[in-house]
Amino acid sequence: MIHAKSIERIFYNAGNGYTVAAYQTEEELPKKIVRSHPRNTGYFQAVGIELPTGDGVEVELDGEWKETKYGMQLDVSSFRICIPETEEGIKAYLASDMIKGIGPVTAERIVEKFGKKTLYIMENVPEKLLEVSGITESRLEIIMEGYQKSRQLRELMVYLAPFGVTSNKLMRIQEHFGNNAYPIIKKNPFRLCEIKGFGFLTVDPIARKAKNFKADDPERIKAAILYVLQRAADEEGHLFLKSEEIVERSAELLNHAKDRQKVSERIIKDIGNEMIRKDQTLIGNGGGIYTKRNFEVEMGAAAELMRLLKRKRKKVDIEPLLQQITAEEGITLSKTQEQAVRQVFQYPVSIITGGPGTGKTTLIRIIIRIQEKLNKDSLILLCAPTGRARRRMYEKTGFPAMTMQKAVGIPSENEDEEESWHVGKLEDDFIIADEFGMCDMYLADRFFSAIKKDATLVMIGDKDQLGSVGPGNVFHEMIVSGMIPTTILDSCFRQEEGSTIVENAVRINRKQTKLIYDDTFEFYSANAPEDASEIIRDLYEDYWKTHGKQTDDIQVLSPLKKNTAAGSDALNEMLREVVNPKRRGRKEIKNGGRLYREGDKVMQTENRDDISNGDLGEVVSIFKKEGKTVMRVDFGDDRLVEFSDDDYWPLVHGYAMSVHKSQGNECPVVIIPMLGCFWRMLQRNIFYTGITRATKKVIIVGSKRAVAQAIRNNTTAKRNTLFGMRLKQVGKELLNAYEQRSA
Ligand SMILES: Nc1ncnc2c1ncn2[C@@H]1O[C@H](COP(=O)(O)OP(=O)(O)OP(=O)(O)O)[C@@H](O)[C@H]1O
């Protein structure tokens, strides 16, 4: 505990309360600090949440010293404001940044009126403040809100401090639960498990200590069961688990510490049953156990989709328009393509699926033109499940497109919730959703339920690509259920460069391990990751040198990220030194353990505003701005973003990326390492997704055995979901109801 006086606030993020502040103390400080501020003894900096700052405010800070790029700083885990006893002290405290709505003048007036009793009044009879001139009811509300908020945060901090919860984590708790974080956590500390980065094993000791839970306390077991299901959804994409799996995984979690009394599988089973029968937080259905939410989205999405599908639709004859428009476009559609278009205008809901070059974009254009001719006033929505897919849809079709999340009002990670959240139906009459394979069960549920009753929905995608990141296997389940009218486009029309890629894509899906290798689909043999890395370096450098020293048209995609010389992390470091080495005058900056340099190719790793996870950009400059170092990145399309050095950057280098991150992307030349040592990641859909990102050329570096292994292996596809079965179930019920009504 250090007793100190606040000097100044250096940085403050109003959104989450993150503060950097300078303090002065008379106590002994670590030698490093003393050395770096020889003329200013007792000076140090601290970071934390809502740190008390303001001229002369006295505090006691508790935390750990941490070495940062700004020197030694105290990472504050808890603090106490030394309640001032003199009137001067109280004035300083009121006017400090801690209490919003009070400036020096008002502080002076308040203390003049209430003297040393001021803080007692604020705590117990705040309405008395209305007697002070200048404090109106609305101002009092602001003052009290700020006062309560900082008090609650302080309480939460004090509550969690003994467990070593860092300021970073406190920030996430505050973001997740809002201003009521403290009472929520106090009531049930296990709710911390809802936050990313708080696993059951982190929360368990906190909760047990805070609430004195016994090992077999029902609250503890329930938390473990919910956590097991949540993790299965996040990490494996499962919407349910079998009851034995839940019991086994929960027992492992609950009995993680050897010295504790064991929680038996019997008790876990009993509590699980109680959650199903009494609490109704779990649902047992179809042989699996779901969380309530997962069951509701799976069932809800099925009901909503069938509701859309089972509507009677007015028959329209599109034949003359189809002839006219294809003639105008100078194209003769194949039989299957024609069927896809007819199906769109015959059914309220339909699916078109096909690999690269099978004409999906061409069909979107034709479908839109027909719809515009049929009804020029109809509202048409083009959308896709990710920002990048949306942008590509726009570029390819020439029609504006938006993300499905935005269309249905799901706020992205960094948007102001209230602003973008709207509940209600979409106004659009005709909706085309592209890259539907990337849509997970949660988004599908919201999306289907937002579509109005008489609208038409067309879902387009490539069923053979990697599925959604989030849980479920929506696109695939819809297709195999046979309930949604589907056209599979299987002929490729792309005659230009890169057609071998398409031919190989077809072979891969037919599980043919013999691929065609030519100058658009090259192969370089390598066995060890280090050899592959060297070959990739030579190929990349050669291409870069002969193509105007640009990196835009070439991309390395690795099935793996870490722990190998041929993973995207290591390849990034190696390639950066090849194309953008250290040079005098080329500024550099470090963030999150990574060194960035002017001219670097970078990739965004989160969805933020209009930059999507996986978007590539270039570091255009690094400079000083308002006392901070800022890095400016150009993401194209006039999207310039500044990253400030006191923030966390959702960035990595972008010369190489994992195949998973490349979903929805396209690039002329793609290099893919395929090595035996990637074993678990040698999967058909990963390989297929990787090669189909290339429009002109694919270069495989590795072994043909690994390629063959990947083509044969399709184990990732299995996810626990019964969405397809539910579509059939609901369809049958609707049919029965319909027959009963007409009987
Ligand atoms: N029936 C057809 N006859 C001749 N050419 C066609 C036909 N259908 C599509 N094409 C052409 O094939 C090429 C690929 O079509 P399109 O871009 O629509 O496919 P896609 O499925 O959207 O491909 P990707 O998913 O790779 O973007 C285009 O040049 C298109 O003009």
Image (cartoon, rainbow, N blue to C red):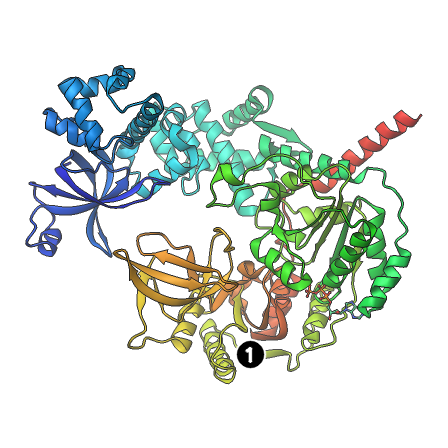
Residue 544: give x, y in percent of width and height.
Answer: 49, 80
Residue 655, placed above or below residue 196? below
Give the quadrant of the N terminus.
Answer: top left
Residue 42: give x, y in percent of width and height.
Answer: 9, 46
Would residue 415 be visible to someone looking at this image? Answer: yes
Residue positioned 76% across, 47% down in the render:
377
Residue 281: give x, y in percent of width and height.
Answer: 56, 26
Secondary structure under the numbered disc 1 in the rendered image: strand
The residue lying toward the viewer, choosing from 300 and 228, is: 300
Residue 717, placed above or below residue 516? above
Q: Which residue is mark 1?
A: 525
Give the quadrant of the C terminus.
Answer: top right
Residue positioned 40% across, 71% down in the render:
599
The residue lying toward the viewer, choosing from 358 and 732, is: 358
Residue positioned 68% across, 78% down in the render:
497
Q: Is residue 49 left or right of residue 454?
A: left
Residue 250, placed above or below residue 363? above
Q: Is residue 94 left or right of residue 706?
A: left
